């Protein structure tokens, strides 16, 4: 694990200790990827959240690895951490750190950190919409190449719609733009309760990288179906 990965884990440990209890969703399922990795494999995700009157914390882990005949055909690990300092019922200041290692993207790793302002445009039991805007800093470590460091501007959007007692739609969009590169992430999923703490989740994640290393695709997609356990 790289030094950046260890830093993210350290931030997670300190951040989530601010509040109790910790809630979470653990996912395991099937994913089909296209772009720099064309494969079908098993993936695993873990989401942890913790909140009190003044703070809200969130941590997301993603991992998938696939090998065929002794050859690795897909390998990706990602960590995303965010802490929100509440200003009032709708406004907050966020701090975010992400680290991604996709061994087929042409980058050894991509690490970002940022702060900014967030506002809940909608906040009800059925629908919520949150917008975020702020500066950041990104390290693009190119495989067998230089590290491209840059200041970025980040725009984020998160939407959730609980359209029945047992099902919900979730969607997100982020774009981080700098002088060296612009990276956008878009995702959408539908989650339906099966029984108790178990649910079925199907979705699509898309990553668009404006400037990629030679012979790499600028669009990566992941289509997945997972079983989710909430605790």
Image (spheres, rainbow, N blue to C red):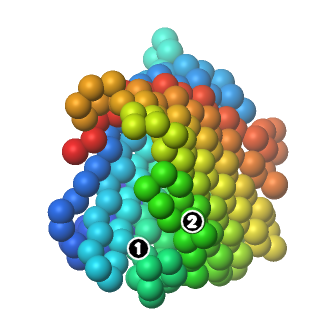
Q: Give the image location of residue 64, x and y in percent.
A: 45, 34
Q: CA distance from mark 2 to mark 1?
A: 20 Å
The answer to whether 22 appears left or right of 73 in the picture is: left
| Residue 147 visible in this rendered orientation of the protein | no
**Pair 2/1: label in front:** 2
The furthest residue to the bottom: 87
Q: Which mark is residue 83?
A: 1
Q: Residue at x 32, y 44 (%)?
A: 25
Q: Seen from this angle, which residue lies furthest left? A: 21
Tag 2 secondary structure: strand
Location of residue 83 (image quadrant): bottom left
Q: Is residue 189 above or below residue 123?
A: above
Q: Which part of the image, by quadrant, shows the C terminus?
A: top left
The mark found on residue 122 in the picture is 2
Q: Position of residue 146 (x, y in %)?
A: 69, 64
Which percent across, then down, holds residue 31?
52, 26
State the residue at coordinates (36%, 30%): 193
Circles 2 and 1 in contact, beta carbons < 8 Å: no
Is 209 positioned to the left or the right of 161 in the image?
right
Work out whether residue 25 can be spotted: yes
In the rendered image of this protein, does residue 54 appear above or below residue 155? below
Local packing at callout 2 (Cα closer than 10 Å; few below 14, some 14-19, many 20+) is some
Q: In the image, what residue occupies the spot 23% across and 31% down?
A: 196
Considering depth in this image, is 29 or 203 the residue closer to the camera?
A: 203
Dot 1: element: strand
* Sequence-wise first label, 2 or 1: 1
Dot 1, how many residues are within 10 Å of its Cα: few (below 14), some (14-19), or many (20+)? many
């Amino acid at each position: 694990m790289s030094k950046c990965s260890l830093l993210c884990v350290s931030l997670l440990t300190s951040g989530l200790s601010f509040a109790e209890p910790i809630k979470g969703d653990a996912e395991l399922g099937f994913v089909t990827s296209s772009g720099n990795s064309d494969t079908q494999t098993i993936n695993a995700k873990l989401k942890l959240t913790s909140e009190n009157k003044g703070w809200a914390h969130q941590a997301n882990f993603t991992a998938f690895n696939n090998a065929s005949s002794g050859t690795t055909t897909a390998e990706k690990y990602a960590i995303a951490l965010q802490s929100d300092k509440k200003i009032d019922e709708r406004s907050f200041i966020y701090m975010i750190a992400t680290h991604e290692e996709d061994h087929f993207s042409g980058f050894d790793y991509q690490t970002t950190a940022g702060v900014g302002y967030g506002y809940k445009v909608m906040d009800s039991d059925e629908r919520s919409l949150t917008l975020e805007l702020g500066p950041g800093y990104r390290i693009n470590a190119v495989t067998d190449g230089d590290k491209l460091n840059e200041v970025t501007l980040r725009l984020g959007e998160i939407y959730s719609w609980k359209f029945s007692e047992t099902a919900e739609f979730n969607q997100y969009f982020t774009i981080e733009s700098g002088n060296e590169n612009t990276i956008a992430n878009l995702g959408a999923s539908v989650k339906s309760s099966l029984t108790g703490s178990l649910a079925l989740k199907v979705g699509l994640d898309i990553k668009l990288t404006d400037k990629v290393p030679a012979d790499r695709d600028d669009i990566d997609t992941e289509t997945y179906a997972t079983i989710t356990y909430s605790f």
